[in-house]
Image (tube, rainbow, N blue to C red):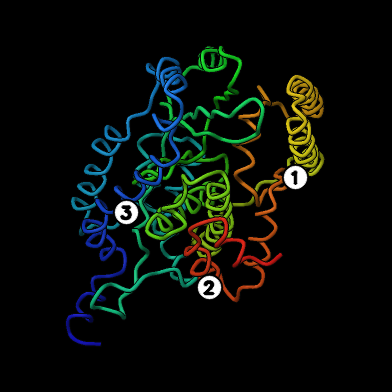
Amino acid sequence: MNALERSIESMGKYRLLLVAGFAGAVLASIGTLTFLAASTLRASSSDDLSETIDAATQSYRFSFVEYEVAHLPNRWLYEVADWFDEPSDDEGETLERWFSTRSLTERKAAEILLERQLSQATGALGLETSLPLFSRVRIPWPPVDMQLSDPLHVLVVSRRDEVRMLGTVLLKSSVPREAYERIESIVEASGEWSAWVGRVGGVALYPASVVSSRTYFDTLRIMAHEWAHHYLSFYPLGLAYGRGSDMRTINETVADIVGDELGETAAALSRFSMPRPDDSQRVALLEATDPILRNLRIEVDSLLLAVRIEEAERRMEAARLQLLEMGRPFRRINQAFLAFRGSYAARPSSASPWGARLIQLRSDSDSLAEFLVAVREIGSPDDADALLPR
């Protein structure tokens, strides 16, 4: 290691992230905005549908540009101001206060601590990247950058005669619950489309918009999921996000696999010891109801293939009422809802074949890093089919 490399390394990995962050933030923002734009329903769909979407969402549409202007500079300016200072409070006390009160005065410190934990975990799992010209200096790339925020909303649009996501439109966090059905009814007025509006736990903006979950462990997993999207946006897999439902599903499933393992590692490495909640009842509920959703998707696909649209919609409503009685309420289950949930194929409720194949590849890989290096080169369903075990 030469003198310059030793000097860089002596800065400390976290401070080095700040330097790299200045260089990478704009590139990461461009990459993730490209990734998001690829999945957004715009004029590439029919003109009539685009106009209808605009009319339905004009008061609530999320602005990528406003978000970046508001959050990206402020974040790095805050870090510069804190360049020579470590957080004065104990890590555990800060996070304990955040997860118990969600006080805005604790948010920034909590973000920094959670980001550090996730950055540390990327190193432990071999997911760091060497700096150009300084191969021995390795950092997470892009630098971990998260914004704990109120949940954003999403409008999902599918055809009625097929469970296939045509696109999504990101909506502001301020969308009132009573506006959901109004937006959906405007989109569905022609009888051709299915629409669903709901909240999302995270969005891979830069910094990522992440909802602090009810638990410390779940929050780390959501953050890790969004960082995986940041990482993939520089490779063929992330760049292909908007090229059809298969590529979206593969992207989201890879992000789930990486997010679960990376988040768990971050929690295990942390000095912050927070007892895991007793999730036995929740797990039992999911185990009882996920097969219902998975079988529903298979049944609905079959009915729609036979052009039995109304029967498929009655079946979805019946399943919704069944799940409600079992203690798992869904406001609405329709073609758009199933299309959105089907993108996360590693989850037990999904009927997508990509999930089992990606999980098997991770099992066959010696490490998470090996798995990620392999899947990041997938640029098409044919690439995935050639790589993944059957």
- Percent across and percent down for residue 180 are 54, 17
**Residue that mark 1 sits on:** 283
Residue at 35% x, 51% y is 145
- Percent across and percent down for residue 326 are 81, 29
Q: Quadrant of the C terminus?
A: bottom right
Q: Is residue 90 visible?
A: no
Q: Label 2, secondary structure: give it.
A: helix
- Residue 138 placement: quadrant: bottom left
Are there few (<14), some (14-19), or many (20+) residues within 10 Å of tag 3?
Answer: few
Q: Of marks 3 and 2, which one's residue comes earlier in the chain?
A: 3
Asked if labels 2 and 1 touch by Cβ distance under 8 angstroms, the answer is: no
Residue at 46% x, 72% y is 126
Q: Is residue 89 visible?
A: yes
Are there few (<14), some (14-19), or many (20+) residues within 10 Å of tag 2?
Answer: some
Q: Label 3, secondary structure: give it.
A: loop
- Percent across and percent down for residue 222 are 52, 47
**Residue that mark 2 sits on:** 370
Q: Label 1, secondary structure: give it.
A: helix
Asked if labels 3 and 1 touch by Cβ distance under 8 angstroms, the answer is: no
The amino acid at mark 1 is: Val
Give the distance between the C-alpha atoms of the residues marked 3 and 2, in whole angstroms: 35 Å
The amino acid at mark 2 is: Glu
On screen, 185 above or below 241? above
Are there few (<14), some (14-19), or many (20+) residues within 10 Å of tag 1?
Answer: few
Tell me the mark number nearer the camera, choosing from 1 and 2: 2
Direction from residue 67 to residue 189 in the image, left or right: right
Q: Nearer the viewer, residue 82 or 120?
A: 120
The amino acid at mark 3 is: Pro
Q: Quadrant of the N terminus?
A: bottom left
Give the distance between the C-alpha atoms of the residues marked 1 and 2, in whole angstroms: 30 Å
Give the distance between the C-alpha atoms of the residues marked 1 and 3, in whole angstroms: 36 Å
**Residue that mark 3 sits on:** 87
